[in-house]
């Protein structure tokens, strides 16, 4: 549970109270009057409400929460009970106002507020489900071959096209017309019992009646009507249904009426209205088997009509359905009759093509979007222009579930939503632009390179910073920068050791350059407020061996206008041992720039100090294995001591990383270690926020 608070003076007490009462409580101090994006999922806001400044801040926070439609209850805390302050706090929107020190009262209110929050979230969830069910029911009635009408208080409140055709009227004439006007006069006595007030708790029993309807042309027809009481938009109503088998010439329908009925249920309209995911899954499974036989991929297109939700909300279900029918007809006309095409969601279609490359597929989808821009869809009383968002993927094997290919297309469409209108010129995205074509083949070097480069392009990578703390005098505020993913998790099929694999390929050079430039940018901003900050950045083996890297680094460093004393570059010991000349060249280049060089994973070569003669290093970091062994055995202590002694004799400072607890710190102090780093100090974070002033 994430809790925000503005109570800086009482935060320790609040943290202790909440963590004793609730499990896994994350209390974050809200110093500024801004609800940031990463805090929008907070469960609660505890705000001070004593001073005038507090009152201004609280009003701003409550206003922000309302404007952003956030579900964050606010509980106000004040030092002394003041009835006026309590009344004012509740009036501006707080869930409650509590006096500091009334811990049990506060916990009771928090539990009540969280319970109410959970209840109204659950209520909203079921309301959305109910609304979706009603919409789905309306679409089924619209597309039914049966004649269906809903009647409340003797008035038609809904009629599908088949029912309208049965009466020979237009939809406008039928809607809101008295049901008595649709029946012959001699049927009025039979109708009266059906028009009495309906009870939601005591519904009318279902029944069948033969009724004689009066058509607009003056003729009459006898049909059997199934009558049921239903709930429609929260109110009881009667549903009249004339089964398709009874609406024919044998039931007394004229040829003209039968013709209207056939038009209302023509196969094209029915197919456009019918959401049939199962049929398209069968098509995909058939194509999957075909890719094995032909060794040629097939392409799947998820085509979303972007205006559907807006039309459904503004103009109603019928208008949105008419738009989907128009979009289906457009696609069928553009694609031809032979390509598999089907509606799979309220607002989306799937279709499949073969004998296309990915580049061809993109061009074809872009042409569809362009042609649709020129198309006007008739909705009856009005017309509308529609737009597609299209996600594409290649079906290239039969080892996946059919739905997994659709999921890939959905990921591509959601990427379009994330990018916004400025992200792409046309709303078409290939899944293969986001992830490798073959996830199973990610072990191959080319696929690793492709995926990591796409992560860089899509800004799915960021930097994390971990502090390095001196055991003696802290002259600089030191941080090491790490590259990490910004997405919550890698896609299914992507190995979790992706970066470890990537740094064994040439793409590591791209990662180095990106991390260095990003590190320069963050450091430049940091130095304005903290001029003593120093940043450690990694140089991998591909960059070390790249003859153009040193020149690129020099230009980048000079363009960043950063004091050389604020930078340290690090190289792994094994990379140095395999590229001694390149290391010496880079060390000389950095020395000319007055930038320092460090050595990581130190102590694995034998003897440990020999590597320090190959180039001039300012710092060394012993390998993680040495630190772990030193924490568990006497032999490990001796090995770590030998490495540190060799570094000290060479005049090199020692930083011990991977310090997980305080038990090893006295040993490190005794061995003369200069700095320590690890989760005991702080885990890597998105910003450089360690409080070094506490060490002084």
Image (cartoon, helix red, strand yellow):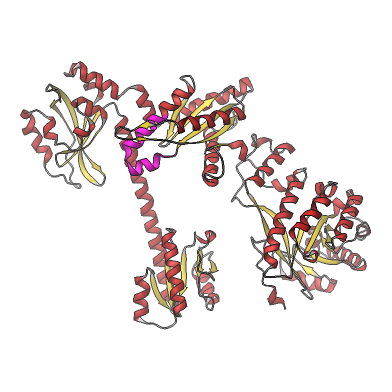
Q: Is residue 541 left or right of residue 10?
A: right
Q: Is residue 80 above or below residue 337?
A: below
Between 589 and 438, the one nearer to me in the picture? 589
Image quarter of residue 228: top left
Residue 140 at x, y percent in the picture: 32, 33
Q: In this view, does 162 lie to the left or right of 406?
A: left
Q: Is residue 462 magenta?
A: no
Instruction: Quadrant for the C terminus, please.
Output: bottom right
Q: In this view, does 200 lie above or below 183?
A: below
Image quarter of residue 9: bottom right
Residue 246 at x, y percent in the picture: 21, 22
Q: Is residue 325 magenta?
A: yes
Residue 548 at x, y percent in the picture: 83, 47
The main secondary structure of the magenta stretch is helix
Q: In this view, does 208 lie to the left or right of 651?
A: left
* Image: magenta residue range: 306-327
């Amino acid at each position: 549970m994430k809790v925000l608070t503005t109570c800086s003076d009482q935060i320790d007490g609040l943290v202790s109270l909440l963590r004793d009462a609730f499990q896994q409580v994350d209390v974050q101090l809200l110093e500024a009057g801004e609800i940031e994006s990463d805090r929008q999922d907070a469960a609660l806001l505890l705000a001070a409400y004593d001073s005038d400044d507090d009152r201004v801040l609280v009003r701003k926070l409550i206003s922000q929460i309302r404007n952003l439609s956030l579900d964050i209850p606010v509980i106000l805390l004040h030092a002394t009970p003041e009835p006026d302050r309590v009344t004012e706090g509740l009036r501006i929107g707080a869930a409650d106002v509590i006096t500091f020190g009334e811990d049990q009262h506060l916990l009771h209110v928090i539990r009540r507020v969280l319970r109410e929050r959970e209840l109204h979230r659950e209520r909203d969830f079921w309301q959305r489900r109910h609304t979706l069910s009603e919409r789905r029911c309306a679409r089924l009635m619209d597309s039914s071959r049966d004649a269906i009408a809903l009647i409340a208080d003797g008035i038609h409140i809904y009629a599908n096209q088949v029912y309208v055709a049965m009466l020979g009227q237009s939809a406008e004439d039928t809607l809101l017309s008295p049901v008595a006007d649709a029946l012959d006069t001699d049927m009025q006595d039979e109708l009266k019992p059906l028009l009495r007030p309906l009870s939601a708790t005591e519904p009318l029993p279902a029944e069948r009646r033969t009724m004689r309807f009066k058509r607009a042309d003056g003729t009459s027809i006898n049909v059997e009507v199934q009558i049921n009481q239903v709930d429609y938009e929260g109110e009881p109503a009667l549903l009249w249904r004339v089964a398709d088998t009874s609406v024919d010439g044998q039931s007394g329908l004229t040829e003209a009426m039968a013709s209207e009925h056939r038009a209302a249920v023509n196969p094209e309209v029915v197919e456009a209205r019918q959401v049939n995911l199962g049929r398209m899954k069968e098509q995909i499974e058939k194509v999957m088997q075909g890719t094995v036989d032909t060794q040629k991929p097939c392409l799947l297109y998820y085509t979303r009509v972007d205006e559907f939700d807006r039309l459904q909300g503004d103009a109603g279900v019928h208008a949105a359905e008419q738009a989907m029918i128009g979009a289906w007809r457009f696609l069928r006309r553009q694609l031809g009759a032979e390509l598999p095409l089907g509606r799979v969601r309220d607002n989306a279609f799937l279709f499949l093509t073969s004998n296309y490359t990915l580049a061809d597929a993109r061009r074809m989808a872009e042409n569809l979007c362009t042609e649709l821009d020129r198309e006007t869809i008739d909705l009856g009383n009005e017309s509308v222009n529609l737009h597609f968002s299209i996600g594409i993927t290649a079906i290239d094997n039969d080892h996946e579930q059919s739905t997994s290919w659709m999921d890939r297309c959905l990921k591509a469409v959601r990427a379009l939503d994330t990018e916004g209108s400025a992200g792409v010129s046309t709303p078409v995205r290939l899944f293969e632009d986001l992830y490798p074509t073959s996830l199973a083949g990610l072990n191959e070097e080319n696929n690793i390179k492709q995926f990591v480069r796409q992560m860089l392009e899509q800004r799915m990578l960021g930097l994390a910073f971990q502090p390095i703390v001196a055991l003696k005098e802290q002259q600089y505020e030191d941080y090491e920068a790490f590259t990490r993913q910004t997405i919550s998790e890698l896609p299914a099929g992507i190995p979790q050791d992706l970066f470890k694999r990537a740094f064994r390929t040439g793409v590591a050079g791209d990662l180095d350059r990106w991390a260095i430039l990003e590190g320069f940018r963050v450091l430049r901003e940091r130095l304005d407020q903290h001029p003593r900050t120093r940043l450690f950045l990694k140089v991998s083996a591909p960059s070390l061996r790249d003859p153009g890297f040193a020149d690129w680094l020099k230009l980048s460093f000079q363009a960043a206008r950063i004091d050389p004393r604020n930078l340290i570059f690090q190289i792994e010991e094994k990379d140095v041992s395999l590229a001694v000349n390149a290391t010496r060249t880079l060390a000389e280049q950095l020395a000319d720039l007055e930038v320092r060089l460090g050595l990581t994973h130190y102590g694995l070569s034998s003897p440990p100090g020999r590597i320090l003669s190959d180039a001039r290093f300012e710092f060394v970091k012993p390998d993680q294995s040495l630190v772990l062994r030193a924490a568990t055995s006497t032999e490990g202590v001796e090995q770590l001591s030998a490495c540190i002694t060799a570094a000290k004799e060479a005049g090199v400072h020692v930083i011990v990383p991977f310090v997980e607890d305080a038990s090893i710190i006295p040993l490190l102090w005794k061995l003369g270690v200069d700095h320590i780093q690890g989760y005991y100090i702080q885990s890597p974070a998105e910003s450089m926020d360690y409080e070094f002033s506490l060490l002084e």
